[in-house]
Image (tube, rainbow, N blue to C red):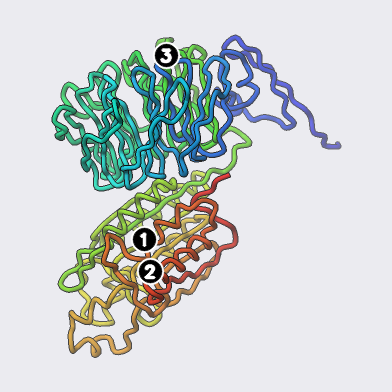
Amino acid sequence: MENREKNYIFAIKLHNCNLFIINEKPMKKSIFTLFYFFILPSLFAQENEIKILSGHSDDITSLVFAKNGKWLVSASQDNSLCVWNIESGEKMKILSGHTDNVWAVAVSPDGKFLASGAWDNIIKIWDTDSWNCLKTITKHTDFVNCLAFSPNGNLLVSGSANGIVKIWNTSTFDEVKSFSASRENIWSLAFSADGNYLATTGNDRTIKIWNTNTWQTLHIFTEHTETVCCVAFSPNGKYIASGSCDKTVKIWSTETWKLMKNLTNFQGHVWTVAFSPDSKYLVSGGFDRRLTIWKIENWGEVKSFIDKKAITCAAFSPTEKFLAIGGWDNTVKLCNLSSLELNIQNNPVEKQNDEPQNVDILEKRIALVIGNSNYKNESKLLNPKNDADSISNVLRQLNFEVSMRNDLELNQMKDAINDFGNKVKSAKEEGFHVISLFYFSGHGMQVDGKNYLLPLNDKIGGKEDVPFETVDVDRILAKLEASGSSLNIVILDACRSNPFEKRFSSQFKSFFPDFQEGLAQPNLTSSGTLIAYATSPGKIALDGEGTNSPYIEELLKNIRKPNLTIEQVFKQVRIGVLRRTREVQLPWEANSLIGEFYFLKKK
């Protein structure tokens, strides 16, 4: 019998709206899940259900509603902000002026001012009547990641990628105070409803609670095991919610300042949490594409949806009528809360047994970063720990799930590498297109043409001990190849000065008769791998006299430039390091890549 394609017509009744969906291929049962309709254009056209606000050309990073609920502002990595009319869904205004990703947006309690912060290190203050820029603040020296107005409107607080929090008087927007809240990267901050407390989160895996009268730390929550990405106080003042790269949402009591609930139904970074104005619900979203609405009464799920791409921000309107959601699909979804029936007691969660069809394979980026500085005796290095902190910061901003470890001994290094390989393998088995990145800064050496990375406190007494007291780079490559990742990136800033020459003094040559400086050229046996060296084979890399090594300074500058292929990034690094070191140090790469990869891709 001749096979012929058929058109299938389905009629579905959802929230009293009849939807007619025509498809050229049979649909699987999973396509009837609620959120697949949530993201289909057919549903968005239905009046008073869900609107798609399209106008950005890159990822949405932050959302904020007007205090009267009449407009919404979205920030994006396309360097702009869009102002939307809530009732019509129409774009009212595009706010331009930032020269890099706009990462934060906040509105003053009286609704007169809008503040935006970006990766150009700048804060802009906008008049919400004319939408003119009233002031440009340039005192931050690193990315501005987050902003918040105090409840009384007297202060604006900003957090940046170097761990600095700055406080501004809103009458003049002059700086009144600055302090360090994390060793690097303030990702989120929030005021309590009464304005007495400020919560800050960062890469140090903690949540710090500050007294806003004295600006002293009152409490430090340390229960998260990875970077804390977001934090929010409930409007009734009873709770603090936080989301983390450790794939959890944690709930804290402001009465006891203790952890009271751990929510774990996540498969990736939790990037946003927000309370409803009536403090009855909490919404969370993240890199696993899952939006979850929790009922605070019992901390149970009432709704859970799967989107096509990662969810980075969510906000309830002050009128409690809408929920806005933004993410990697460059759109804002404006959902009428009445259509979600949140007020129904014990409303069951729509089960997601299968993924929706026609969803692209998602990319997942996983990195292990190791910085070994505190070597014994004269082998101690100044910058590897700083280098590891700095590259971790930037990789997280480039959507890598980063595990950073510093000053590791041999077994700790091996355990970290095994965990890294297992994470990559698990992500691959979950269906992700996995990009793996391994970075090491510290001492390295070559023996008989093989490369080894040195842990702290090695027990090397001669050449024969090296394979047993160090980590073989080939072992790392084999681990990544076995994991099935689509692209493996290995960055070795490990060609520093010889750690054994001073240790063994005049006996060095007898212990290492054929010692060669630097690292050896690798032997790549499979496609999809790039190995980057801080300097060319057999040469020494400089540790540097500043905060970072010359190599990492150039890498940090070039890795976040948009629309450069990975090969172009490292070419620019090579040019920069040659210039910095007056052609003493020549970075070098070996690769077997067969496709293109961009650390930061912009349309």
Query: In the rendered image of this protein, does residue 241 appear above or below residue 510?
Result: above
Query: In the rendered image of this protein, does residue 18 appear above or below residue 516?
Result: above
**Identity of the residue drawn at 33% across and 21% down:** 299
As measured in the structure, the alpha-carbon distance from the residue carrying label 3 to the one carrying label 2 is 53 Å
- Secondary structure at badge 2 equals helix
> At which x and y percent is residue 33?
56, 25
Amino acid type of the residue tagged 3 in the rendering: Asn
Amino acid type of the residue tagged 1 in the rendering: Glu
Sequence-first tag of 1 and 3:
3
Which quadrant of the rendered structure holds the C terminus? top right
- Secondary structure at badge 3 equals loop
Sequence-first tag of 1 and 2:
1
Q: Do callouts 1 and 2 mark residues in contact (Cβ within 8 Å)?
A: yes
State the residue position of label 2: 580
> At which x and y percent is residue 419?
35, 53
Residue 68 badge: 3
Which quadrant of the rendered structure holds the N terminus? top right
> In the shown orientation, is residue 485 left or right of residue 151?
right
Amino acid type of the residue tagged 2 in the rendering: Arg
**Identity of the residue drawn at 31% across and 75% down:** 467
Depth check, front residue: 115 or 269: 115
> At which x and y percent is residue 186?
30, 40
Residue 553 badge: 1
As measured in the structure, the alpha-carbon distance from the residue carrying label 1 to the one carrying label 2 is 10 Å
Quadrant position of residue 158: top left
Q: Do callouts 1 and 3 mark residues in contact (Cβ within 8 Å)?
A: no
Depth check, front residue: 258 or 334: 334
Quick one: which residue is furthest to the right in this view?
2
Residue 270 visible in the snapshot: no
Quadrant position of residue 117: top left
- Secondary structure at badge 1 equals helix
